Amino acid sequence: MTADLFQPYALNASITLNNKILMAPLTRCQADDDLVPTQAMADYYARRADAGLIISEAVIIRPDGQGYPNTPGLFTPEQIQGWQRVTSAVHAKGGKIFAQLWHTGRVAHSHFFGGQTVAPSAVKIEGTVPRQRELAYETPKALTTDEIAQLVADYSQAAANAIDAGFDGVEIHGANAYLIDQFLHHDSNRRDDEFGGTPENMARFPLAVVDAIVNRIGNERTALRVSPGAYVNMQGDSRDRAVFDYFLNQLESRQLAYLHVGIFDDALTFEYLGGRVSDYVRGHYSQTLVGVGSYSAETGAQAIADGRFDLLAIGRPFIANPDYVVRVRDRQPLVTYSDEMLAELV
Ligand code: FNR
Ligand code: 8K6
């Protein structure tokens, strides 16, 4: 059954993956204090180059996108150089790597950049920053239309920087209740201008980011992660369904490299989506779909065989097993993941 995972897969005419196992994006908070990737990060990613595609940990596109300590950026020359070290190390071992482009919106904190947090609407989340529990989330400033246009330009520049840094492409982080996802859910988007209120309006900024990046680096190198099911830092709303029906339909014409579900456990079901997030997306999107969320190689391979998605992303087990792909292929036992493993890069 898992043998099928080791078949090559063509994302499009320019990118063919060696196998169907992707390393999911995993924030590790280990960049240096200028948010520059380190040699330890290059070594960490190179050890995982057997994945069909590595998706980098989320990378902030500009300072006010930062919501956690020491998350790497892609907006200074030093950060671009740091990433060049990472991409060369992965390429030297025959791997491929996309950069995940990130702005956390209202999940950002001024502690990290000394300015005001921004979001679609001035609606804050409850709670405190993980790992910095003394920092309570702040009420963000609602973005003006000029500021929204600037954000689109900044995403596009970060995508160009990713290509300069040697990445094979980018995955736009449109999932997990961060900035792009905040436009797509009613809980966080209360706008009454052309960016809120209706599915067309709520999808306008996300589609503008996609289109700007596609124009800049090409559709074959552009991918997107989405979370139609709200599960963290966001309240679900049955009206969100119509937003995603519209958004997914629009995405069909963009011919992206792939679409990726953002969820921790794909066994979760959402009433307003009629079931699992992956099944909902598959029903509304016909092109390459990456599934994720508490799968093993066996259950993931079964889901691919059943036509539920095309490629499998693996997160936590890849932290615990740098040689995950080889262990699965050779039927060796896996090391079990535990949260303590987040303390250092192995
Ligand atoms: C994540 N996840 C995540 N997702 C994302 O889109 N960008 C990110 O930077 C991160 N960072 C991150 C850090 C850590 C420590 C964890 C555990 C998770 C979510 C991740 O990509 C994946 O969707 C989940 O981990 C579910 O897959 P597994 O772990 O069950 O295979
Ligand atoms: C400082 C570490 C930053 C890590 C950021 C990535 C996110 C990891 C933790 C998010 C936890 C959300 C899990 C929610 C699951 C809910 C299931 C109903």
Image (cartoon, rainbow, N blue to C red):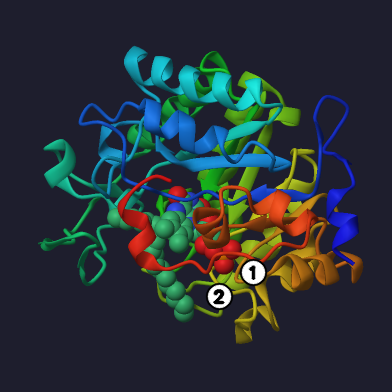
Contact (Cβ within 8 Å) of mark 2 with mark 1: yes
Amino acid of disc 1? Ala
Residue drawn at 48 percent across, 48 percent down: 194
Front-lying residue, 19 or 201: 19
**In this orientation, does residue 227 appear?**
no
Amino acid of disc 2? Arg
Height in image: 336 above or below 211? below
**In this orientation, does residue 60 appear?**
yes
Height in image: 54 above or below 106? above
Location of residue 107 in the rendering, given as x and y in whole percent from the top left corner: 30, 56
Q: Marks 2 and 1, how far apart in space?
A: 6 Å
SS category of the residue bearing label 2? loop
SS category of the residue bearing label 1? helix
The N terminus: image quadrant: bottom right
Disc marking residue 269: none
Residue drawn at 23 percent across, 72 percent down: 126
